Amino acid sequence: MHDYLLSVLLGIVEGLTEFLPVSSTAHLRIVEKLFYVPLDDPFWKMYSIVIQLGAILCLPIYFRARIARFLSTFPRGERQDRTVLTHPLSLVMIAFVCTAVPSLLLTKLIGKHLESLTVMGVSLLVGGIVMWIVDAYFGSPRTVGRHMTERMEDVSLTQAVWIGICQVASAVFPRTSRSMSTIAAGQVAGMSRTAALEFSFFLSMPTMIAATGYDLLRTFHPKHGAEALGRMPIVVRKPVPGYVVGRIAAAVWRECIDLVLQGVIDVPDLDRAVSLGPALGWAAAGPHLTYHLAAGEGGVTAFLQHLLTSFEGLWDGKLATWQRLEPQQQRQLTQAIERAYAGKVEMLREARDRRLSAILRGLEQSRAAGPG
């Protein structure tokens, strides 16, 4: 499916599930899996978090009158019986801190669980059972006609801390709904379902804004953002036309095109030769390190002494030097590629994405294990 259509579908799923006591994150990840989106792809992990901000932003609009009243009565409250620590807005922020700090420390574990359908499935079943038991046992008022806490304005400091701690489960196990965790925790602590649900909505505002902001900060940070998307930053000492990567890609592709147009090799065989030859070695070490290591203890000095002549023989007029791909050549190349991969584009795209994810995951693990 095209990414734009997939994004529309995921937006609908998010909108339908965000305010129900089910995990919108897990539903997004399941739909992504159904459409062959790699669950370990860093971009789609980020997407599944950031998309929830759109649903959350409607809450300040819906609760605008309530928020205005809370702000106007801060810190004493409507009945003048609250303090800076026990005002509803303060309790929301205290619960947020109790959720955010452990979740931040467990970022890697949370990201790993966003890849696992097994974790999501188990969390769905366990979360549903827990919610059913809690609602059956604590859903009815403890005294005749009343719960301990009927309104969000009456939530205590202890209840807020308890709810914040319980919400960590929804971060670590992404099939566990935030609203379900809040409602269940609130009912256990003596809150009515209505009070717990309202507190859940207010708590979701700072929680999702912080989660989205953190992910976006990592994504757009010049170092951490690149790593989060499976890339590493490079330092360019002066500007060059086409950028570094573009120039390398253009030079290699020109030679690949030339070999195909001359009839030396077919498109599929050339693609395999590149991906299993230089591209594989360069993905692991880059061109200079590859040749530096190839000569053993002698390093690049020994490599140049023994093999430079063979490279110079190719550079001396034996490689493609044309600067324009003529219309007839464009048609010839297009026909060769389309003939080679006709009817296989979706399957090949999925295979490419799986391989890229595996390569990036392997590179990330190897970098974490040692230098380089």
Image: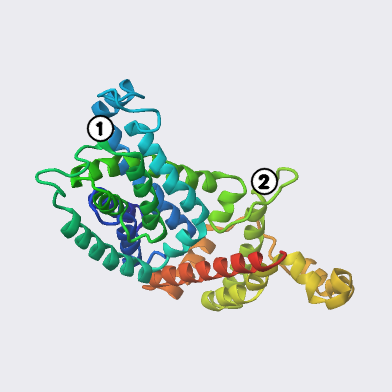
Q: Are marks 2 and 1 in contact (CB under 8 Å)?
A: no
Q: According to the image, what is the colour scheme of the structure? A: rainbow
Instruction: State the separation of the CA atoms marked 2 and 1.
Output: 52 Å
Give the side of residue 341 with respect to residue 305, left or right: left
Q: Residue furthest top?
A: 72
Give the structural element (helix, strand or loop) at label 1: loop
Q: Please, is residue 98 above or below residue 250 in the view?
A: above
Q: Residues within 10 Å of mark 2 (few under 14, many from 20)?
A: few
Q: Nearer the viewer, residue 58 or 252?
A: 58
The residue shown at (59%, 57%) is 231
Q: Can residue 317 be spotted in the picture?
A: no
Front position among marks 2 and 1: 1
- Residue 63 bears which disc, if any? 1
Q: Please, is residue 340 above or below residue 94 in the view?
A: below
What kind of residue is marked 2?
A: Pro
Give the labeled residue for mark 2: 241
Give the x, y percent position of residue 178. Answer: 32, 52
Q: Residue furthest left?
A: 145
Q: Where, quadrant-wise, is the C terminus in this rendering?
A: bottom right
Give the side of residue 295 with respect to residue 209, left or right: right
Give the structural element (helix, strand or loop) at label 2: loop
Q: Please, is residue 84 above or below residue 8 in the view?
A: above
